[in-house]
């Protein structure tokens, strides 16, 4: 649970902005989206390998 202390006389918009920033840092939305749909481990591994190939291709182009 995220707790944001609101100071006396502090604008509510500013406190809300601090809450949003803190919530983004915890990764709550990413976690919710990842749990929304199940992906098989084989698909996760395939995506990981494809990403590694893409990054390696970019590095190879950079070195040429």
Image: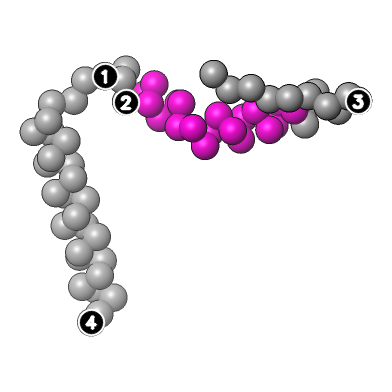
Position of 60 with respect to 13 (left or right) is left
Res. 64 mark: 4
Residue at mark 2 to residue at mark 1: CA–CA distance: 6 Å
Position of 14 with respect to 28 (left or right) is right
- Residue 28 % position (x, y): 46, 26
Residue at (8% x, 33% y) in the render: 42
User: Mark 3 highlights which residue?
Assistant: 9
Q: Is residue 48 at all visible to an observer of this figure?
A: yes
- Residue 60 % position (x, y): 20, 73
Using the rendered view, name the quadrant where residue 37 is placed: top left
> Bounds of the magenta span?
15-33
Element type at mark 4: loop
Q: Is residue 11 at all visible to an observer of this figure?
A: no
User: Mark 1 highlights which residue?
Assistant: 37
The answer to which of marks 2 and 3 sits earlier in the sequence is 3
Asked if the residue under mark 1 is in contact with the one under mark 2, i.e. CB atoms within 8 Å, the reply is: yes
Asked whether residue 24 is drawn in magenta, I would say yes
- Residue 33 % position (x, y): 37, 24
Res. 34 mark: 2
Residue at mark 4 to residue at mark 3: CA–CA distance: 59 Å
Q: Nearer the viewer, mark 2 or mark 3?
A: 3
Q: Which residue of the protein is positioned furthest toward the bottom in this rendering?
A: 64
The answer to which of marks 1 and 3 sits earlier in the sequence is 3
Asked whether residue 57 is drawn in magenta, I would say no
Residue at (21% x, 20% y) in the render: 38
Foreground residue among 42 and 27: 27
Asked if the residue under mark 2 is in contact with the one under mark 4, i.e. CB atoms within 8 Å, the reply is: no
The crowding category of the residue bearing disc 4, from other C-alpha atoms within 10 Å (few below 14, some 14 to 19, many at least 20), is few
Foreground residue among 39 and 4: 4
Position of 27 with respect to 16 (left or right) is left
Foreground residue among 51 and 7: 7
The answer to which of marks 4 and 1 sits earlier in the sequence is 1
């Amino acid at each position: 649970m995220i707790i944001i202390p609101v100071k006396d006389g502090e604008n509510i918009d500013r406190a809300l902005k601090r809450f949003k920033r803190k919530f983004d840092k915890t990764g709550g939305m990413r976690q919710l989206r990842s749990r929304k749909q199940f992906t098989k481990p084989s698909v996760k591994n395939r995506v990981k390998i494809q990403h590694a190939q893409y990054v390696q291709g970019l590095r190879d182009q950079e070195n040429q």
